[in-house]
Image: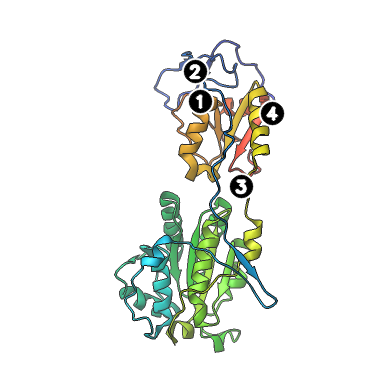
């Protein structure tokens, strides 16, 4: 962190206004911290003592996994409404793979998709017209479709879904995949593919999109068995939205879309290895250690990122409890209100001077949902 040319005053601090025409505001320290670590108004804030209850709330039950010599499967319930879902097909009624795919999306709670049609994905589009639940928002380009799905995910917190055809339609999604992976945005992208017998023959509009996107997706699938569709879709949504969120690709050959099948919606998914790598709940000893460090620190700063966006209320309660000022990453903007007196706004080369100065001189940095990227 570069050293500032001039030191800040010890008694007051002028916080720059975001509006050039507005007058500057003089900020003074509270009794909790001294400048330049908490440039907040003069009024004294009373902070409650921080403690941990002896009885921590029990974490939600972890998915149980069963391991055998032949396969490893994990039982995961991704949508509680699946038990009450009513299919438009009879229990033993055969239907096209495309209809199975659309119903699998419905069972995941999808109500909006961003789909641009093409020859290899036409069966999926026809199946969408038979859905009374999903609305298709037609983009003018596949890249616009995936960025629209990304915007939907950013604003709703739910996985965004986009659909494109094979070849150039699929490759037009590449920039969106990279953006969603780097920004940790949950996306499920579905692409059409040439029939299985034509894969690898340089068929019309054939592109090995799984290989093309392997390094810019969290995971990807090439569906080679129509009976795998329910399982693949369930896994894709879980992968996209769990852990560090990101984009997942499902590539579906055209003959799979056309094949008739009676789907099995109760297939277990095999993600035991992935589940073992997910973060575990912290134990009470670690929490008590954090509380001790906070209590002993004189100049603590909170550093929050996109991982806190879905925990905004808990973050505000924590700040209210401790009175610790908050610096944010670009992705973390919105997790804590920038108008709050404890907000230092954004950290890093494009951030505020006082946020950078506060973190540089802090004696305790609490990082929540961040990855310490190169611009910080």
Which residue is at the far top?
11
Q: Which residue is mark 4?
A: 2
In whole angstroms, how far apart are the C-alphas of marks 3 and 2? 30 Å
**Camera sees residue 98:** yes
Of labels 4 and 3, the one closer to you: 3
Left or right: residue 42 versus residue 363 is left
Label 1 sits on a secondary structure element that is loop
Label 2 sits on a secondary structure element that is loop
Q: Give the mark nearer the N terminus: 4 vs 3.
A: 4
| Residue 132 placement: quadrant | bottom left
Residue 342's disc is 1
Q: Position of residue 142 (x, y in %)?
A: 44, 66
Q: Residue at x 58, y 43 (%)?
A: 369
**Camera sees residue 334:** no
Q: Position of residue 318 (x, y in %)?
A: 52, 32
Q: Which residue is mark 2?
A: 46
Label 4 sits on a secondary structure element that is loop
């Amino acid at each position: 962190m570069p050293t500032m040319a001039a030191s800040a005053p010890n008694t007051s601090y002028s916080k720059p206004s975001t509006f050039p025409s507005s007058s500057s505001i003089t900020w003074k320290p509270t009794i909790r911290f001294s400048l330049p670590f908490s440039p907040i108004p003069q009024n004294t804030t009373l902070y409650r003592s921080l403690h941990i209850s002896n009885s921590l709330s029990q974490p939600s039950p972890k998915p149980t996994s069963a391991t055998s010599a032949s396969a490893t499967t994990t039982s995961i319930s991704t949508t509680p409404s699946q038990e009450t879902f009513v299919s438009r097909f009879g229990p033993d009624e055969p239907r096209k793979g495309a209809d199975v795919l659309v119903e699998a999306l419905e069972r995941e709670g999808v109500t909006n998709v961003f789909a641009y049609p093409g020859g290899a994905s036409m069966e999926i589009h026809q199946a969408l017209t038979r859905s009374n639940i999903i609305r298709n928002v037609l983009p003018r380009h596949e890249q616009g479709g995936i960025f629209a799905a990304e915007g939907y995910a950013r604003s709703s917190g739910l996985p965004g879904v986009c659909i494109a055809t094979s070849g150039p339609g699929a490759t037009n999604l590449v920039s969106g995949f990279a953006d969603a992976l780097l920004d940790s945005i949950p996306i499920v992208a579905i692409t059409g593919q040439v029939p299985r017998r034509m894969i690898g023959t340089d068929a019309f509009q054939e592109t090995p999109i799984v290989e093309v996107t392997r390094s810019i997706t969290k995971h990807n699938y090439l569906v080679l068995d129509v009976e795998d569709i329910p399982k693949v879709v369930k896994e894709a949504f879980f992968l996209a939205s769990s852990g560090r969120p990101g984009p997942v690709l499902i590539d579906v050959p055209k003959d799979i879309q056309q094949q008739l099948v009676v789907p099995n919606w109760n297939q277990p998914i095999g993600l035991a290895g992935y589940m073992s790598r997910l973060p575990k709940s912290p134990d009470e000893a670690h929490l008590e250690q954090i509380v001790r460090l906070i209590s002993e620190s004189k100049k603590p700063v909170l550093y929050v990122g996109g991982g806190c966006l879905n925990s905004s209320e808990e973050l505000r309660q924590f700040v209210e409890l401790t009175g610790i000022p908050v610096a944010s990453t670009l992705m973390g903007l919105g997790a804590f209100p920038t108008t709050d007196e404890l907000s230092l706004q954004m950290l890093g080369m494009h951030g505020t001077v006082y946020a950078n100065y506060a973190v540089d001189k802090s004696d305790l940095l609490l990082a929540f949902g961040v990855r310490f990227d190169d611009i910080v």
